[in-house]
Image (cartoon, rainbow, N blue to C red):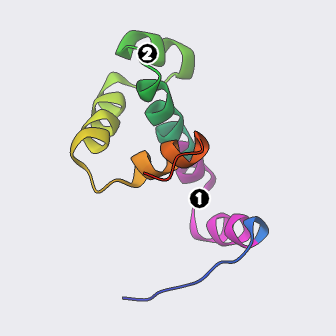
Amino acid sequence: LLQIHLETAEECYAFFEDLCTIKEMKDLSSRLEVAFLLDRGMNYQQIADSTGVSTATISRVKKCLEYGSGGYRNAINREKGENK
């Protein structure tokens, strides 16, 4: 498996701009927003209304939060200033 080491936010932006289409970038951003909103206790309808994301996508993100490998949880915890 190829491993890369991006050191700055600018390198990350450039990498993902080259790697992903605009739609893919928007989808990734929306999913991360959904994860944060779920963590704040918002329900599916509130999230769908405020983001325009489908309830199927919200459900998928919720499953990842509960049973996934921890990627969303790490991002949420770091945003909160936690290390867990």
Q: Residue furthest bottom?
A: 2
Residue topped by disc 2: 42
Q: Nearer the viewer, residue 57 or 79?
A: 79
**Residue positioned 59% across, 51% down in the render:** 25
**Residue positioned 71% across, 64% down in the render:** 13
**Position in image of residue 54 (x %, y %):** 39, 25
Residue topped by disc 1: 21
Residue 57, magenta (yes or no): no
**Position in image of residue 38 (x %, y %):** 41, 26
**Residue positioned 43% across, 15% down in the render:** 42
Give the SS element for disc 2.
Answer: loop
Q: Nearer the viewer, residue 74 or 55?
A: 74
The relative height of residue 5 versus residue 14 in the rendered view (above or below) is below
Going from N to C along the chain, the mark reached first, 2 or 1, is 1
The relative height of residue 39 versus residue 80 in the rendered view (above or below) is above
- Three-letter code for the amino acid on which mark 2 is drawn: Met
The Cα–Cα distance between marks 2 and 1, rounded to whole angstroms, is 29 Å
- Three-letter code for the amino acid on which mark 1 is drawn: Thr
